[in-house]
Image (tube, rainbow, N blue to C red):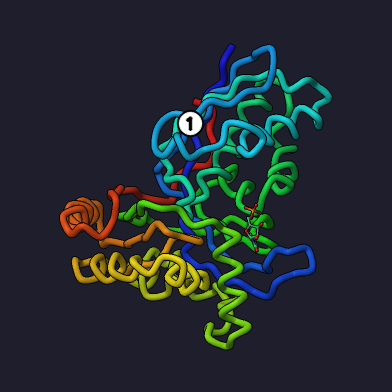
Amino acid sequence: MSVTVRVPAKVNLHLGVGPLRPDGYHELVTVFHAVDLFDEVQATPASELSVGVVGEGAADVPTDSGNLAWRAAALLAEHAGVDPEVRLEISKAIPVAGGMAGGSADGAAALVACAELWGVSRAELPDLAAQLGSDVAFPLLGGTALGTGRGEVLAPALTTGSLHWVFALADQGISTSAAYRELDRQRAAGSAPPPSLDAAAMLEALRAGSTERVAAVLTNDLEPAALALAPALRRTLDAGRDLGALAGIVSGSGPTCAFLCPDAGAAVKLAAALAAEDVCRTTRVAAGPAPGATVV
Ligand code: C5P
């Protein structure tokens, strides 16, 4: 009777942050890229809604309505006109508060799993995902996609080949809203670079399948904010670049750092070298694009 859904982490290959909107969100031009670092959400019919979490950083994940998977089940139940009588077991491999949209991925996975249980069609899920958060719609789709609006308006991007990554995980998380607030503060103080609202160079590099060109145009407008909130990340980025990454950026709002490597072998070597440098808690090797939320 259980349904299990596997869902990928994401890194933003381009994260252009526009002005703050009246609704409290920023206008984005972003390129989402799913990587093969997966959480799993298992949904089982039960007498009431509940959430359990095991795995990477589980102790820091809420098991009540603060969890996007909980809110996803509640929203879908309301939409379907059923009671949210489901137990959600989340198995985490995506770093918590790491800038890789792990919480959003769990929300997307819960939507897919509960939709299967309650007979809701997959076509109805993107709208519900967008109501749950800016990053919840993308993990439904996976692959690589251009995101606009506040990140929830998606168009699949054409890509050739795979990208090979090392992710350096940090000890402490960064709250997404804190990172955006810090960027607003830097902009008000005149110390932030202008917004990167044109992702054309990234989309062209992806179409061409050139890892070197992708590396050259990796962009994250939130990086200076993440570095202000977690200054130690500068050492992590420097170490990855010195040890042979083609490029390194902060992933999303951080603090995870993402290093692009020429191939899978180089990524394994870089992960080991970084782990020996004492500049991060641990490392993960991953490749993208990975598929979106899938029933397993
Ligand atoms: O949509 P989500 O709940 O994931 O966003 C978390 C927080 O990140 C928001 O409350 C907001 O402060 C910030 N955010 C933003 N602009 C976006 C996406 C997120 O300011 N486009």
The answer to whether residue 64 is above or below residue 187 is above
Indicate which quadrant contains ligand 1.
Answer: bottom right
Label 1: how many Cα within 10 Å (few below 14, some 14–19, many 20+): many
- The residue located at (58%, 79%) in the rendering is 195
| Count of all numbered marks drawn on residues in the image | 1
Q: Where is residue 79 in the image (x, y as percent from the top left)?
A: 81, 32
Q: Where is residue 78 in the image (x, y as percent from the top left)?
A: 81, 30
- The residue located at (69%, 44%) in the rendering is 129
Q: Position of residue 75 (x, y in %)?
A: 75, 34
Residue with the most extreme bottom position: 190
Q: Can residue 218 be seen in this view?
A: yes
- In the picture, the quarter occupied by the N terminus is top right
Q: In which quarter of the image is residue 260?
A: bottom left
**Callout 1: SS:** strand
Q: Can residue 204 be seen in this view?
A: no
Q: Does the residue labelled 1 lie within 8 Å of ligand 1?
A: no
From the viewer's perspective, is 181 left or right of 191? right
User: Between residues 223 and 14, which one lies in front from this camera angle?
Assistant: 223
User: Between residues 245 and 253, which one lies in front from this camera angle?
Assistant: 253
Residue with the most extreme right position: 81
Q: Quadrant of residue 155?
A: bottom right
The answer to whether residue 25 is above or below residue 16 is above
The answer to whether residue 160 is above or below residue 129 is below
From the viewer's perspective, is 19 left or right of 180? right
User: Between residues 281 and 251, which one lies in front from this camera angle?
Assistant: 281
- The residue located at (58%, 55%) in the rendering is 156
Q: What residue type is labelled 1?
A: Glu
Q: Position of residue 118 (x, y in %)?
A: 72, 21
Residue tagged by mark 1? 40
- The residue located at (35%, 66%) in the rendering is 233
From the viewer's perspective, is 139 left or right of 71? left
